[in-house]
Amino acid sequence: MPALIEARDLSKKYGKHIALDRASFAVEPGRIVGLIGPNGAGKTSALRAILGLTPYEGRLEVLGREPFGNRAALMNDACFIADVAVLPAWLRVEQAVDFVAGTHPRFRRDRALGLLAKTQIAGKRRMRELSKGMKTQVHLALTMAIDAKLLVLDEPTLGLDILARRAFYDALVNDYMDATRTILITTHQVEEVENLLTDVIFIDKARIVLALAVDEIATRYAAVAVTEDKIAAARVEKPFYERRTLGKTVLYFETPDFDKLGSLGDVSTPSVSDLFVAKLSGSAA
Amino acid sequence: MNTYTWLVRREFWENRAIWIVPAAIGAALTLAALFGRVDIAELTSPEQSHAVGGMVLFAFGVTFFAVMNIYATWYLLDCLYADRKDRSVLFWKSLPISDTATVVAKLFTGLIAIPLVYFIAADISTLLMAFIISVRAHSRFGSALWQPDLWLQLQALWLYLIVTTAIWYLPFAGWLLVVSAWAKRAVMLWSILPPLAAYLLERWFFGTHVLGTMLQERTLGYASRAFRYPSDFAWVSTVVGHDTITTPGSVWPLLNPLGFLSSPATWAGVAVGAVLIVGAIQLRLRRTEI
């Protein structure tokens, strides 16, 4: 199957500031991809380019189209939630449903109404009367009722409390995700999404640091917790990052020799968030 | 309903002032007719009735038309900016609606839909007012406000004004949309300062005032293009009490649609307006953030 998103040397400059520097990556259908990086790393620039919201340099194809200049056509098959706060304050819930139903050929009103019924938010309510969490539920209901191939979420849970965040991701995974869909999520809070991602793209200082499938981590990376006396021996294996924890030091290795590491200490597979910290701190050093 | 209908509908949802303001003016005028003074001089001749009736009806129309112009100007200046200010542009852009359709729908709302709402509001409240006054002051006013030819002229004048001002002032509308799509803040200042600065710079550095003349011609030239004043045109003076009222005998000879549509200035304006509107669309395409 061809990639859903294919970027080659994708760059975005604002005057002299380089927000995205020759990024190359691909997103395959049916995956949940996390575009992860610290604030200001270039995540939003990459998303804006993918969604056709901004011009860019380099090559970019989304669902077989060049996004900029084709946004309207692209939005038939792709949809996005930019941020929880973008539904206008004056809009009533029922107006939002009517408007999307009237303008989006792939919107299923019954599905949206079903999802909204579960939230118990009255149709007459205006967005300004709703809490951030409720607004997110409304936006998610609208978006999940669209039969789109690609869903893009940009920091979707920013400013939400832990209950609302959980509810958001549960709804996404349980009610939305299936083999025909692809989700691209940006976040700077890795812990929140690491259990649902199938792929990660780490981005830092406008560059792609790492792009791989989550199940590749186990074969390509290892974390070894060693005691004080074995640190010197472990360093010979060239860890790219070290972290001191309770009485032990954890060393991170790329393309590790598992037999050798096993003799030094407890070998484990780093979690996505550990790998993120290790990769970004390591590359900074 | 198609996409454009939905887009215009959404403008009415967002800008409830579109109908609240004319409804309020209508209510105020109706109240004035209910409780205001109507003890003017007695109208005895048909000429007097015609003059006074015409004056009252057209004064009502002018009130609505003047407020409408102020509101529509503000609307055009605000509409694209407001989407960026509250960031809802990111929601609208997540739907399969082109930026061209969005900008054209807003232009249509400002130039056609809003004037039509005011026109309808003016008609309804004028009917109410006419009814109230003719009941309250029947002996003095008589049927001064119930003259079919005046009503017909009023309808024609409204529609003629809506269409011709939309065409003539298209460059201004386009400019307001450009500012609305572009400015980071202070849209009002940005709509005025650049033309003013360009005008002053031209005067200082070149000693000419081409731009000033163009702007003046566009602002004031409308009346001489859309209307004509035939040499044999009859103004009618009628003495009512101590006052003399001078009214056009009829507006029909004043309307000049052929002259308007055949004037090069009209189409030069349309061309400039079109360029500015394309510019506004391009800005809307690129600008999502304040």
Image (cartoon, coloured by chain):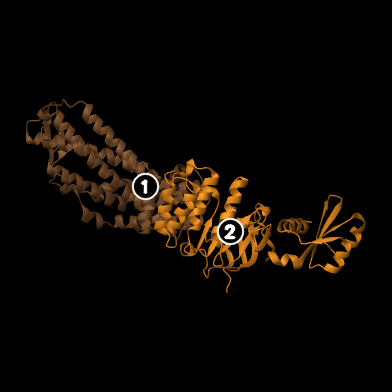
Chain colours: A orange, B brown
Category of crowding for the residue at label 1, using alpha-carbon neighbours closer than 10 angstroms: few (below 14), some (14–19), many (at least 20): some
Question: In terms of secondary structure, where does tag 1 sit?
Answer: helix
Residue A93 in picture, x, y percent from top left: 44, 48
- Judge by depth and name the residue closer to the eye, B10 or A257: A257
Q: Is residue B187 above or below residue A70?
A: above
Residue A275 in picture, x, y percent from top left: 74, 59
Residue picked out by circle 2: A173
- Looking at this view, name the residue that lies furthest to the right: A229
Q: Residue B271: which quarter of the image?
A: bottom left
Category of crowding for the residue at label 2, using alpha-carbon neighbours closer than 10 angstroms: few (below 14), some (14–19), many (at least 20): few
Q: Is residue B171 left or right of residue A39?
A: left
Can I make out residue B252 in this image? yes
Q: Amino acid at mark 1?
A: Phe
* Mark 1 and mark 2: Cα distance apart in space: 37 Å
Q: Are marks 1 and 2 in contact (CB under 8 Å)?
A: no
Query: Residue A281 got which mark?
Result: none
- The subunit letter for the residue under badge 1 reads B
Residue A129 in picture, x, y percent from top left: 48, 41
Q: Is residue B250 left or right of residue B59?
A: left
Q: Amino acid at mark 2?
A: Val
Q: Name the image quarter holding the N terminus of chain B.
A: bottom left
Residue picked out by circle 1: B12
Q: Is residue A62 left or right of residue A38?
A: left
- Judge by depth and name the residue closer to the eye, A122 or A205: A122
Q: Residue B57: which quarter of the image?
A: top left
Q: Nearer the viewer, mark 1 or mark 2?
A: 2
Can I make out residue B277 in this image? no
